[in-house]
Amino acid sequence: MLAVRWHAAAIVIATFGVFTALAHRTLAAECLAVFRALGDGTRDSDGTRLAAARRQLSRIVGRDTARLDAQQIRIAALETLSENLSDGVVAPLFWYALGGVPAMMACKMVNTLDSMIGHRDARYEFFGKTAARLDDAANYIPARVTALLLALAARSPRAFRFIVRYGSAHASPNSGYPEAALAGALDARFGGPHDYDGERIDKPWIGENPRPIGAGEITRAVRLNHAVLALAVALVIAALVFLPLPFPR
C-alpha cells in the first residue's frame, strides 16, 4: 500500500514538473498577441498598432524592436516561435526522457540563464559565455529533433531541404535548424540583419522568398507547434515504455 502511494506521489510530482517546465501555451499566446496587435494587415503603417506590436514583441525577443516595421515584427515572432519550440518544449521533454524531472529542470535553468546573460556583454562576458555554451550543448540534439518534427508535421519536402541547406548557416549551432524548418514550411525568408543593444548584427538569410507575411499565418505556425508537441510527447512515452534508459523517471 505504501509503495502504491509513493508511486502515485511520484506521478503527481512528475506531472506537475512537466506542466511547469513546458512553455508551449505561453509561447503560442505571446506570438499570437504580437500578430493581433498588428491587426489584419490592412493598417501596417499605423503608428499606434506598430508601437503596440513592438512592445509586445519586446517581451519575447532580445533584439531591439523600436524601429521594426510590420513585416519585420511578424518575422521576428515566427522566428522566436520556432526557436523556442526547441528550447521551451522539445528540449525539456528530451531531458525528461533521459533523466526525469531533475534533468528537465536543469535544462530549463540553463536555458533561462542563457536568455538572461548569454548575449555578449562586458559585465557578463565570461559567465555569459559559459551559460551560452551550456545552452548550446543542452539543445544540440533537441534543436535538430524539433526541426525534423516541424518538417514532418508540415508534410513539407521544402522544409526538409531548408533544414539541410540553412540549418547550419545560423551563427547559433542550434537556432538555425527549427527556424529553417518553419521558413521552409511557410516558404518564407527569415534571418538577416538585427539590432542588439544598438549594435547591428548581420545574420545569414534563411530562405530566398522575401514575401510579405500574412496576418493569418501565425495560426498555421501555432498549429504546427501543437503538432510538434504531440509528436514529441508520443516519442517520450515510447522511449519510457520501450527503451532501457539508465535513469529513473
Image (spheres, rainbow, N blue to C red):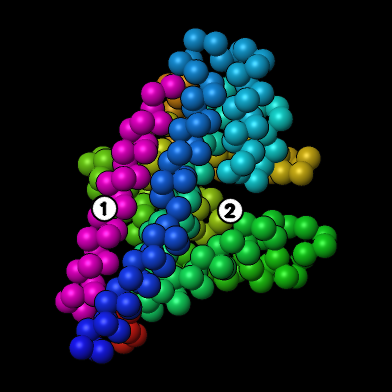
Alpha-carbon span between mark 1 and mark 2: 29 Å
The picture quadrant where one finds residue 214 is top left
Q: Nearer the viewer, residue 147 or 105?
A: 105
The residue singled out by tag 1 in the image is 230
The picture quadrant where one finds residue 119 is bottom right
The nearer-to-camera label among 1 and 2 is: 1
Residue located at (51% from left, 65% from top) = 108
Q: Is residue 211 visible?
A: no
The residue singled out by tag 2 in the image is 171
Magenta residues, start to end: 215-244
Residue located at (64% from left, 30% from top) = 54
Residue 210's disc is none
Residue 135 position in % (x across, y down): 55, 66
How packed is label 1: few (under 14 Cα within 10 Å), some, or many (20 or more)? some
Which residue type carries mark 1?
Ala
Which residue type carries mark 2?
Ala
Residue located at (19% from left, 69% from top) = 238
Residue 146 position in % (x across, y down): 36, 55
Mark 1 lies on a secondary structure that is helix
